[in-house]
Amino acid sequence: MTGVEKIVIASNNRGKLKEIEALFAAKSISIVPQSDFSVSDADETGLSFVENAIIKARHAAEQTKLPAIADDSGIEVDILNGEPGIFSARFAGEGASDEDNLKLLLEKLKQSGETKPIARFQCAMVYLRHANDPTPLIAQGSWQGHIVFEARGSNGFGYDPIFYVPEQRCTSAELKPELKNKISHRAQAMQLLLKKLFNTSEFSDISTS
């Protein structure tokens, strides 16, 4: 191994942590959540998913002195001009629950009269070698679908129960976690990020099996 043995994940969201840990399961690297170091959530002041992901990764790297991975993700609905977008986790206000956010989104969509609003999950994921890394690795994933007006399924979190995946004929929350971790926006971004990581010198000797 050439140096990187542990990476901090810049999130306190248990759903995200579980998905990212699963995607890293086959790698010879220890993945630790920032909560292990009592790191608080960063202030997401960026205007894009990429900016917010970098802000979160830099905050975690500063606090832990470890390389950091962060993602910023959310759902975009075309008829709402891309809302909730970067505000997905706080669409109904700071501290809003998943249920609060989902309810507000459905209320807005019902007013539109659209029966199958086109939507997509977006994810930007970044890796910082250290807090002052001037060239973070960046990967993005997008997952297309549409909104349904009745929540279905108990897997996942956030907007998963109302995000319908046409190819699977079910909502994201009805997918088995193993499948979701292969096809979701976060899975796409992580798989791309892993390819970039293991093409860098500091990861070249790490097993990917």
Image (cartoon, rainbow, N blue to C red):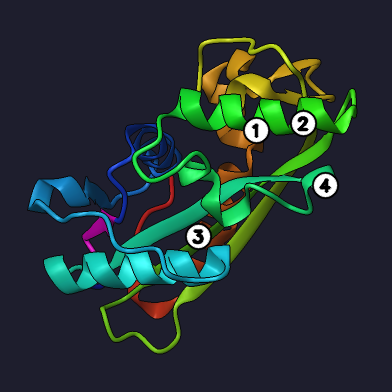
Q: What amino acid type is highlighted by mark number 2?
A: Leu
Which residues make up the magenta segment?
4-9
- Residue on which the image places disc 1: 105
Place of residue 146 in the rendered image (x, y in percent of width and height, measured from the top left): 80, 31
Which numbered circle lies on residue 131? Answer: none
Residue at image coords 29%, 86%: 132
Residue at image coords 47%, 43%: 89
Question: Between 64 and 29, which is closer to the camera in this rendering?
Answer: 64
Answer whether residue 99 is visible to the viewer in this image: yes
Indicate left or right for 49 with 34 as reference: right
Q: Count the marks.
A: 4
Q: Are marks 2 and 4 in contact (CB under 8 Å)?
A: no
Question: Between 36 and 41, which is closer to the camera in this rendering?
Answer: 41
How far apart are the alpha carbons under marks 3 and 2?
28 Å
- Residue on which the image places disc 3: 125
| Circle 2: element type | helix
Q: Extreme left residue here?
A: 37
Choose the circle earlier in sequence order: 3 or 4.
4
Q: Quadrant of residue 128?
A: bottom left
Residue at image coords 42%, 69%: 45
Q: What amino acid type is highlighted by mark number 3?
A: Met
